[in-house]
Amino acid sequence: MNRFVIYEYLMFRRSKIDTHSPREPRGVQSVEVAARLLKALSESNGPATLSALARTADLSPSRAHSYLVSLTRAGLLKQDPSTSRYEFGALARTMGLAAIQRMDRFGLVDDAIGGLLRETGLTVAVAVWNDQGPVIVRWQRGIDPLPVNVTIGSTVPVLTTALGRVFLAYLPAEMSQSAVARELAGLKSHPVGYGLTSRADVLALATATRLDGVARIDGTLLPDLSAVAAPVWDREGQLEMAVSLIGRNNISRVSVDKSPVRELLAFASTVSDGQPG
């Protein structure tokens, strides 16, 4: 065969390969495997066992264990010594909060908080849910500064804060049950107790919150402080975050059609992307 013909044929084959089979950038396979385990944990309803994570990630238990050890050392995971189950660690929570703060949805919240503050003069707090409970992602001080030391990233109680009670009322019960059990045990020895001594009390509180449309509480942080909170919905009608007004003068006892609860509900409606499902 003529050498020129052979050369032309080889160049044609090379052009076909270059055109239709572009070479993907080289990656690190071990990182991709670790990501499968993190994804498996994110899809679970709570802390997960080694076998469950390995099964979901399609890995052998022995191989999964090696990756879980490294992810735990890096702070992306943590292991409960009493149950051996894995949960997201401090670094994962920090990364998650950073991602949340970069979301466009929170840009809308930030734009609207100023208006709510001007209308009410009260401190505004916004929280999302993570594996530890409600986490503060926005805190805007009102006209009357409150003697409360709260920072972005702080975890607040489920049962004894208005923000927490929103998550109690609208999240699936299995998501909050560990936090509720832990807090109930602590309230049994509390001098006030907040009227919560059993699981039945908690269920009644959640029902009352849903019927009212807002969560209310008096005297949790300080005796003369009160708070009211409302849910914010995503486009699928699932609870996305909770927003709260905190101040004095028994604001938690105000009806939903009166200020400042009326302004709070208007804010929640504005920043919601959907309606409850």
Image (cartoon, helix red, strand yellow):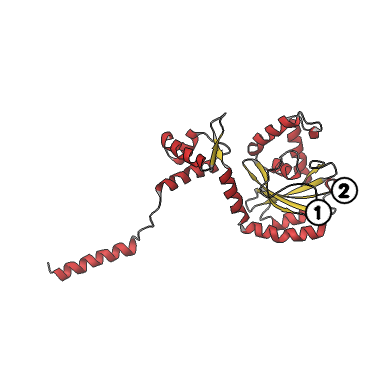
Quadrant in which the N terminus is drawn: bottom left
Q: Is residue 13 left or right of residue 72?
A: left
Judged from the image, the secondary structure of the residue bearing numbered disc 2 is: loop
How many residues crowd around disc 1 within 10 Å: few (fewer than 14), some, or many (20 or more)?
Answer: many
The first of marks 2 and 1 along the sequence is 1
Tell me the SS state at disc 1: loop
Q: Please tell me whether residue 106 is drawn above or below residue 194 in the rendered image.
A: below
Give x and y (percent) for residue 218. Answer: 82, 42
Residue receiving disc 2: 249
User: Label 2: how many residues lie within 10 Å, few (<14), some (14-19) or many (20+)?
Assistant: few
Query: Which residue is at the front of the view, 102 or 76?
Result: 76
Could you give the CA–CA distance between mark 2 and mark 1, rounded to whole angstroms?
A: 11 Å
Q: Residue placed at 67% from the left, 54% from the top?
A: 274
Relative depth, front residue between 201 and 116: 116
The residue sitting at the left extreme is 1
The answer to which image quadrant residue 223 occupies is top right
Mark number displayed over residue 228: none
Say what amino acid the circle numbered 1 marks. Answer: Leu
Of residues 4 and 70, the one drawn nearer to the viewer in this rendering: 70
Q: Is residue 153 left or right of residue 208?
A: left
Q: Nearer the viewer, residue 212 or 67?
A: 67
Q: Give coordinates of residue 189: x percent, y percent.
A: 76, 28
Decide: is 29 above or below 116.
above
Question: Circles 2 and 1: CB distance less than 8 Å?
Answer: no
In this rendering, is residue 171 above or below 120?
above
**Residue located at (63% from left, 39% from top):** 175
Image location of residue 99, percent across then percent down: 59, 53
Amino acid bearing label 2: Asn
Residue 28 placement (x, y as % from top left)? 40, 50
Residue occupied by mark 1: 122
